[in-house]
């Protein structure tokens, strides 16, 4: 278990979770990425397919 501080400054006990992402056809934990790849992963913008900017 790890301890974190919430917005109120209270110490909270939480279980660390592992984030996986699909890379080149297989899933890989983000913790194994190099610093550049982690930065790229966390700055990605996600979209919902089917919504469009242009309405023709």
Image (tube, rainbow, N blue to C red):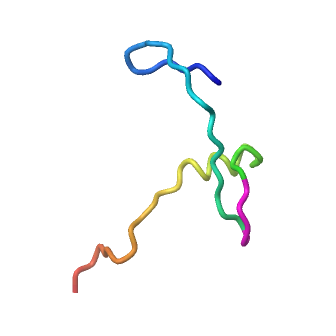
Q: In the figure, 33 relative to 21: above or below?
A: above
Residue nearest the observer in this picture, 45 or 7: 7
In the image, residue 27 lies in the stretch drawn in magenta: yes
User: Is residue 4 rendered to the left or right of residue 31?
Assistant: left
**In the image, which residues are magenta?**
24-28
Query: If the image is split into quadrants, where does the C terminus sit?
Result: bottom left
Splitting the image into 4 quarters, where does residue 24 fall? Answer: bottom right
Q: Nearer the viewer, residue 5 or 13?
A: 13
Which residue is at a point 63% across and 33% down the rendered structure image?
16
Residue 15 percent coordinates (x, y)? 60, 31
Residue lying at the far top in this picture: please name it. Answer: 10
Residue drawn 44% across the image and 12% down it: 10
The percent coordinates of residue 35 (x first, y second) are 72, 43
Identify the image quadrant of the N terminus. Answer: top right
Instruction: Verify whether residue 38 appears in magenta.
Output: no
Q: Give percent across and percent down for residue 47.
A: 41, 65
Location of residue 1 with respect to 41 vertically, above or below: above
The mark tally for this picture is 0
Position of residue 38 relative to residue 14, above or below, is below
Considering every residue shown, the one lying at the far bottom of the view is 56
Magenta stretch mostly in which secondary structure? strand
Residue at 69% across, 49% down: 30
Q: Could you say which quadrant of the image residue 3 lies in?
A: top right
Give the image quarter of residue 51.
bottom left
The residue under the point 70% across, 65% down is 23
Q: Position of residue 13 (x, y in %)?
A: 55, 21
Q: Is residue 30 left or right of residue 6?
A: right
């Amino acid at each position: 278990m790890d301890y974190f501080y919430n917005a109120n400054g209270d110490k909270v006990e939480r279980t660390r979770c592992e984030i996986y992402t699909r890379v080149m056809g297989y899933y890989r934990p983000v913790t194994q990425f190099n610093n550049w790849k982690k930065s790229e992963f966390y700055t990605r913008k996600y979209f919902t397919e089917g919504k469009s900017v242009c309405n023709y």
